[in-house]
Image: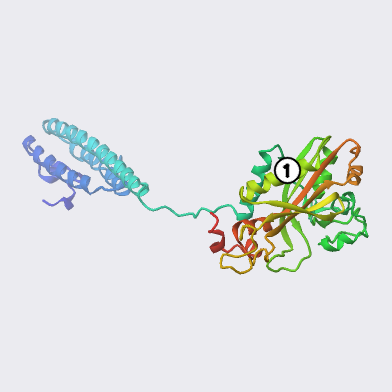
Amino acid sequence: MSFSENKPAQKLADLGVTQPHEIAPLFTEIRARFDADASAAHDEFTWKQFRDAWLGRKSGVLTLITDNWLKPSPPELKRAVGAALNELRAHVESQVEARRVAIESGADEAALARERIDLSLPGASRPIGSHHLIRQVFQQIEDIFVSIGFSVVEGPEIETPYYNFEALNIPEFHPVRDDMDTFYLDLPKGAETPLLMRTHTSPMQIRTMEKRQPPVRVIVPGKVYRRDNPDATHSFIFHQVEGLAVDTDITFCDFTGTIEYFVKQFFGPGVKTRFRPSYFPFTEPSVEFDVSCIFCGGSGTSASGGTCSKCKGAGWIELFGAGMVDPAVYGFVKYDPKKVSGFAFGMGIDRLAMLKYGIDDIQVFFQHDARFLRQFP
Ligand code: PHE
C-alpha cells in the first residue's frame, strides 16, 4: 500500500481493517512515514509545514486518525486504536519539538560561523602619521623655555593695526611697515577698524601685558603672514615664537644669558652665540643674535676645504631679532617704565628648523610631500 493513498483520510472499515491485531502494522507504517517527514524538515519553513501536516487541528494526520479511525470504530477496535494513537501522538509531539530545537540551534551555529571574528586576519591598515617638523621644533622650543619658567600663550592670527603696529611703537608712517607689508581683510564699509593678518607674533606682547601684571614670562608660538614672494627662504606664511620677560629687575645680562641658554639647548653645547646691534621700534637696545655656523663649526671653511656655503665663510649665522623692551611700549599697557624692565625676542621657526636639520628650501614645509615628512618621524 502506498502512502499516496493517505490512509488516515479513510475509515478503517474502508481500509478493510476489522481486527484489533491489524491495528499495530497500520500505525507502524504511519510512524515510518512520520520519521521520514521529520528528517526532511531542515529549516524553519519546512519544519512549519511538517508540524502542520501532523499536528494541524483541522487536517493534520493525528486529527484525521482521531476522526476517521478512532471515533467511528466499534468498541472492540477502539481500545487498540486509542492506545496506538496515544503512543503515536507522544512520539509525534516530542519529535516535532526535537526538530525545532535542532533547527534553531543549527541556525545559531550557522550564524555564529558567519559572524565569527577571525583575529588572525590582517586588519585594515591605517598608516600612523607623525608631527610635522615645524610642530616638533615648536615643541622643542616650548620644552626649553617652560623648563626655565616661561609659560606658553597663543593669540589671534587676525589682528588690528593697533596691536600689530601702533602699540608696538610703530606709528602709521613708520618706514619699518614697509618690511611688514601684509594682507588686509576686505571689510564692510564703516567697519570699526581695519583688520590684517599679523606680520609677527609681537602683538601678543601687548595683549599679554594688558592682561597680566609683572612678572611676565611668556612665549608665543604661532603663524605669521607677510606679502613675500615665495623662494627658498621666503614664504607668505611662516612661523614664529615670540618671547617676553618683564619684571622689576631684569637686566641685559638676564637677557643674553637666557638666549644663550636656549641656543645651546636647541643646537647643542658646542655652539657659540654673539649679538650685533640692530633696530626694532619696540626694543631698545635692539640686537640680532647670531650662532656660530653649525655646518662648518664656525671656521668658515667647509669639510672639502672651500668656503662654507651656509655661512659664506663668515663662521656665523644670523638667528633672530631681540632686545630690551622699549620703555615707550610700557606706556601702551600702563606699566610704569621707571619700575619695570624686560626683554623680548622673536624667532623664525622655519629658519631654525632649516638650520638644525640642514634643509635648504623653506617651501618643503608647506608642500606636504610624504617623502620629506617621513624623514622626520
Ligand atoms: N617681531 C620681530 C620680527 O618679526 C622680531 C622681534 C621680536 C624683535 C621681539 C625684537 C623683539 O621681525
Q: Residue at x 71, y 39 (%)?
A: 151
Residue designated by label 1: 257
Residue 154 placement (x, y as % from top left):
74, 46
Residue 88 placement (x, y as % from top left):
18, 36
Residue 333 placement (x, y as % from top left):
89, 42
Residue 306 placement (x, y as % from top left):
61, 69
Colouring: rainbow
Q: Is residue 205 above or below residue 348?
A: above
The verdict on label 1 being within 8 Å of ligand 1 is no
Secondary structure under tag 1 reads helix
- For the question of whether residue 181 can be seen, the reply is no
- Residue 8 placement: quadrant: top left
- Residue 305 placement: quadrant: bottom right
Q: Residue at x 25, y 42 (%)?
A: 54
Of residues 218 and 298, the one drawn nearer to the viewer in this rendering: 298
Q: Is residue 109 left or right of residue 242?
A: left
Q: Residue at x 70, y 69 (%)?
A: 231
Of residues 207 and 115, the one drawn nearer to the viewer in this rendering: 207
Q: Residue at x 60, y 65 (%)?
A: 302
Q: Is residue 14 left or right of residue 109?
A: left
Q: Amino acid at mark 1?
A: Gly
Of residues 193 and 347, the one drawn nearer to the viewer in this rendering: 347
- For the question of whether residue 8 can be seen, the reply is yes
